[in-house]
Image (cartoon, coloured by chain):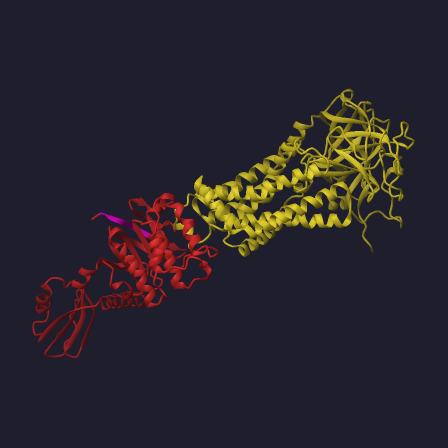
Amino acid sequence: MNQVLHIFKKDARHLWPQLLASLGFFIAFGWVSVKNALQTNGLTMFIGTILSLLVYMNGWILTVQAVHDESLVGENQFWLSRPYRWPNLLIAKVLFIAVFFCLPLLLTQVAILAGCGLNPLASLPALLLNMARLTTVMLIPVFALSVVTSSFPRFTLTVLAALLYLGLLIWGSSLLSSRLYLNVLPDPYSMPLILTIFVIVCLTAITLQYATRSTMRTRLTLVVLPVCIVALMLARPTAALARHLYPDIAQASQLPGSMVFDSDPSRQVPDLSNGRRRAAPNGIALPFNFSGVAADSIVRAQGVQVEISAANGLHWSSGWQQVFQIILPREKMPSNIYILVDPDFLRRLGSTPATVTVSLANAQLAAGQRSEAIAAGDDYRLPNGGVCAADTFTSALRCRYPVYTPQLAYMTGRWTSGPCPETPSATPTGPEGGVWLGGGNSYGVAFALSPVETGQLQFSNRPYGKGIGPSFICPGTPVSYTPYTVVRQFRTTQTISNLDLTRYSTGTVQMH
Amino acid sequence: MTPVIQTHNLSRTYGRTNALRGLNLAIPQNSIYALVGPNGAGKTTIIKLLMNILKPTEGNADVLGIPSTQLAGDAFTRIGYVSENQEMPDWMTIQVFLDYLRPFYPQWDHTALVRQFNLPLDRKLRHLSRGMRMKVALASVLAFRPEIILLDEPFSGLDPLVRDELIEGLLDRASETTILISSHDLAEIESFATHVGYLQQGQLLFSDEMSTLSDRFREVEITLPHPQPLPAAIPATWLQPQAVGTVIRFTHTEAANGAASAELAQIFPTARNITLTPMSLRSIFLAIARTEAHAIQKGREA
């Protein structure tokens, strides 16, 4: 441990100018982040973006410099012939990054939450998890590249080469299979598995390099890693996952609602202004009517898969594509499902009648305990820990949440476009409206530095873009809040015959 | 005496280049072993293999009884290494550098060395001259009293004054340590080395005690009554034999015992005069190097 602290102190002494600059970046970033979370402002948003970049770069530069202070590449470094123990050296570097990057960032995030009126202590586990994710994705790869380079210019060149390599790999794999990008049914296994492999391989490479300084072997390990990840993504057994996560419900009586294709010509994709169809279609928009969803629940379509076949033998099957569509408990709710389709196939198919089998992977959510409260003060505090306030810049109710977007919930209340009266009114006179909030991002702000997730609420009965004033939930206004939780996941399938897909195709318009 | 450094068939290749081929070396305790050879002979490679900075392609080496490939951590409290190309933490002053290294070693004392080498403690390493950097490097090794010191071309490019200071510093510790020093310049090490090995193109041509070497090698001059060609079968112990008129000259590599004169008299019975002259170390090495170069040339022509 003495050796660890000794090396740590030496690094801190060497890099103190950078550490001072780093402190300045954190303070500025924290201040601007609070400003941005409380009120939208173009200038502070721009400054916030620049500061985020500076904080990231600062973390990368500190990591690279700390590692390169005892470079592992080369034969002439003084420390190679000194009694360094490699585990101590590695721990000293990790400690340096933890103390001078992770800890200040964590403290900055705590300060940002507090500055935004959110409870930092309640969010501490989420902040720590978020920090682990941030470190995994942002710092470990930089650490891994630092151990196989000897100087900052070489590191920079290696990063550029790595980006080029990744670009070529992704381009090559896209030629190999479009499934890489389209086969993205949300599942709880793939991303953790890929991240785990990524972390294990990077940490193995780092440890291997510290233990043996076999630079070529370590570089080879790092070169092979992206190939493995792309292969894993290509080989992902999405069909099996879909069967496992979204079991097919055979009996209509067990379905929480019905999905019926709407053949009404008025719901076809309209012709272009000159009466022609799209010359470069890349997808289809199929109109459906959903009905029969129970009053106390909703259905959320999460993934869609389509199989298209025609009498002339043409056949095409998509992978699972991600959709995010809430189906409400309302009689005959019309909605379009958008599906990306191979443009070549659509061109070859033309207007030939086709049989289309659409499968939807759905989640059924049940309404939880509805809570009602009287809004107090300028900020309306949500039961899930979020805080909402009128945003004068965007004319919307702007909510901020600690670290994660909250679970899906429906909020109702009477909002007003004018300033709130001096004395709270017992009977607000504004229009009654409802809005969905949360439920989108389960990964929180893992890849952002600010721990505050913000979102705007546009009430259901509020017209968009009319240039009206901001929404206010005035003090004294009764507001209801109903959370929704997933109770089951299931798959539904519908087959539609004799469909002319040119009537439903979407895509870019080619000018002739 | 038990060797403190021993290698067995130690080899190292870089791609298709053999930097070191089958080195068998034994360096006795408390010796000052000079590893001599031209640039590119493989001297630095040997030292880096012994320090576990490089891994051998074949063979093995033991340093203080530890396989060189396992040298790490605490083992370096017993081994010191100084190289002309060593990268130092240039941002440190001499004082900070010495203070930084101190806690790594169980025993450390640089006070006398700072005085002896006249080191400006407040000067940053990046601002030091080459000679001063070598003095700091040597002081940072002598300070922990290692059992073995490996020096790779420590005097290269230094002025005589600094070189003498470094040698003096080394010799002060010679009684308690074993020193392996590499050099391409014989004159640098001739005065204080106890053993010498000659390396050329990755091969150790010989390794011997300095005193034995001086005894073994003689410059031979034989004067004959009439011009005479060289004998058909030239012994392997004759290097660079030449016949010029009535005189035959060569370097005898095994002239340590008195039998050499008698042997020569037997081969050249009509010789008027046979003289065996002791050689300087420089002449010995030149003779060996030229013979090897000639053999290589012949090998290429064949």
At a point 72% along the width and 37% down the height, the residue shown is A322
Asked where in the image residue B67 lies, by quadrant, the reply is: top left
Write down which chain is painted yellow.
Answer: A
Q: Which residues are magenta?
A: B2-10
The quarter of the picture where residue A260 lies is: top right
- Of A66 and A188, the residue lying toward us: A66
Magenta-drawn stretch contains B281? no
- Quarter in which the C terminus of chain A is drawn: bottom right
Image point (52%, 48%), residue name: A12
- Identify the colour of chain B in the image: red
The answer to which image quadrant residue A39 occupies is top right
Q: Residue B130 at x, y = what percent?
A: 40, 63
Q: Is residue B148 positioned above or below A189 on the image?
A: below
Principal secondary structure, stretch drawn in magenta: strand
**B267 displayed left or right of A137:** left
Task: Look at the image and tell me whether residue B97 can be seen.
Answer: yes
